[in-house]
Image (cartoon, grey):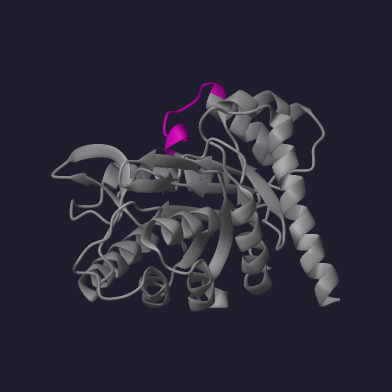
Amino acid sequence: MSTHPISENSVGVGLRGDHYAEATSSPHSIDWFEVHSENYFGRGGIPHKYLSKVRKDYPLSFHGVGLSIGSTDPLRLNHLTRLKELIEQYEPSLVSEHLSWSSIDGIYLHDLLPLPFNEEVVNHLVNRIQQVQDFLGRQILVENASTYLEYTNSTMTEWEFISEIAERSGCNLLLDVNNVFVNACNHEFDALDFLLGVPVDLVGEIHLSGHTVKKLPEGQIRIDTHDQRVCDEVWQLYATAIQRFYKAPTLIEWDKDLPPFSILLDEVAIARSYRRKRRNAAA
């Protein structure tokens, strides 16, 4: 099985079980698909049946949610072994993980939890990412996470933090534009500073998704829920992002309260329209 490369400037969607049939049988305009790696750790069955069908016609990206790369727990050999087997079986163009942690002393918290932005954590993550890349025999991408609190012992900005990790570890960045916007609102920084602070050559993929605004007595907070359309403010931030990171392929994420497949196609069309405007303006 040869690798289908994900083209520059292309737009894909996250493949979920509810959309297996339409993704593999109906003509559509989606360029590539991304799956959560752990959903295919089981062997055989319906998930692999449809993933194999998709793989025949489309490039794939594997996006991990369970490695807990930021934890101080030892990296789990069984997790990495199964991931490597899947990579060898399906040959995805991209493999990514989150810059977060979700376990402590072997207890999993089922969430992507934030990290302090300081040199000690940078050193820890660089070492962990290099271990993962050495084991898999390939480069990975790491995603900036959405966060709802900040650490008092952070000594750098989030964009300085993720850029230094990527430069020193040899990985690339998966730039989640929605997460940039959510964090900018939650922590009161300028999202444009984030985009301008990330080196262009480090960004290998872009994510877009919807989020929820929750009102609390203390004020409001934005939560990265992946359960609705991309909002206008994030589309506008995306328009700015692709001025710098135009070559990076874009993914539409939708993980809960899945809509009809046609809604995902609408989101793909909107992303393409922004890319087209950028291309026409540059011509």
Locate residue 118: give its quadrant: bottom left
Residue at left 54%, top 40%?
Answer: 35
Residue at left 37%, top 68%?
Answer: 158
Extreme residue in the front direction: 217
Q: Decide if residue 173 is on the left or right side of residue 2.
A: left
- Looking at the image, how many numbered discs can be counted on the residues? 0
Name the residue nearer the viewer: 92 or 249.
Answer: 249
Q: Decide if residue 179 is on the left or right side of residue 78.
A: right
Q: Position of residue 266 (x, y in %)?
A: 75, 40
Report if residue 16 is visible in the image.
yes
Report if residue 23 is visible in the image.
no
Q: Is residue 42 magenta?
A: yes
Residue at left 58%, top 58%?
Answer: 206
Q: Quarter holding the C terminus?
A: bottom right
Name the residue nearer the viewer: 38 or 90.
Answer: 38
Q: Decide if residue 7 is on the left or right side of residue 173.
A: right
Q: Position of residue 168 (x, y in %)?
A: 37, 77
Locate residue 100: give its quadrant: bottom left
Above or below: residue 124 compared with residue 257: below
The residue stretch that appears in magenta: 38-46
Name the residue nearer the viewer: 63 or 188.
Answer: 188
Q: Is residue 179 magenta?
A: no
Q: Position of residue 263 (x, y in %)?
A: 70, 34
Q: Position of residue 242 (x, y in %)?
A: 66, 67
Extreme residue in the top direction: 45
Above or below: residue 158 compared with residue 38: below
